[in-house]
Image (cartoon, helix red, strand yellow):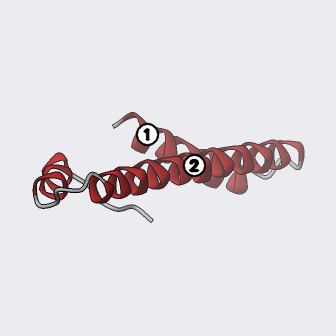
């Protein structure tokens, strides 16, 4: 789902088409992809928080470190 879109691609779509439809379709696809990625990321964060809580309740250090590391990595990707 991680697609790479550039401003150049957008300009090409606008420049090669006298219709705005192609540019709008590309822009809609970009926004939809960004939206779906955000929803997926938020869902994974929520799931990891539940798993971390469960690992703490069960005093499972290995699981805690595994989930906490994944959550930290997810946050680093978002902040970049």
What percent of the width, then of the height, locates residue 65? 63, 49
Q: Residues within 10 Å of mark 1 (few under 14, many from 20)?
A: few
2 or 1: tag closer to the N-terminus: 2
Asked if the residue at tag 1 contacts the one at tag 2, i.e. Cβ–Cβ closer than 8 Å, the answer is yes
Q: Nearer the viewer, residue 28 or 61?
A: 28
Q: Residues within 10 Å of mark 2 (few under 14, many from 20)?
A: some
Farthest front residue in view = 18
Q: In the rendered image, which quarter is residue 46 located in?
A: top right
What percent of the width, then of the height, locates residue 9? 17, 56
Image: 57 above or below 26: above
Q: Nearer the viewer, residue 51 or 15?
A: 15
Looking at the rendering, in which quadrant would you find the C terminus?
top left
What's the CA distance linking mark 2 and mark 1?
Answer: 9 Å
Looking at the rendering, in which quadrant would you find the N terminus?
bottom left
> For the point 81% across and 42% down, which residue is it?
53
> For the point 73% across and 42% down, which residue is it?
49
> For the point 43% across and 39% down, which residue is it?
78
- Mark carried by residue 37: none
Image: 34 above or below 4: above
Q: Which residue is mark 1?
A: 78
Q: Secondary structure at mark 1?
A: helix
Q: In the rendered image, which quarter is residue 13 located in?
A: bottom left
Q: Which residue is mark 2?
A: 41
Q: Nearer the viewer, residue 62 or 73?
A: 73
Q: Secondary structure at mark 2?
A: helix
Farthest top residue in view = 79
Q: Is residue 31 left or right of residue 5?
A: right
Q: Nearer the viewer, residue 53 or 17?
A: 17
What percent of the width, then of the height, locates residue 54? 85, 48
Farthest right residue in view = 57
Figure disc tally: 2
> For the point 12% across and 56% down, which residue is it?
12
């Amino acid at each position: 789902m991680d697609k790479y879109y550039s401003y150049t691609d957008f300009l090409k779509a606008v420049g090669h088409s006298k219709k705005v439809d192609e540019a709008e379709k590309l822009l809609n696809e970009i926004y939809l992809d960004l939206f779906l990625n955000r929803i997926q990321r938020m869902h994974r964060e929520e799931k990891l928080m539940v798993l971390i809580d469960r690992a703490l309740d069960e005093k499972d250090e290995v699981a805690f470190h595994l989930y906490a590391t994944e959550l930290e990595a997810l946050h680093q990707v978002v902040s970049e």
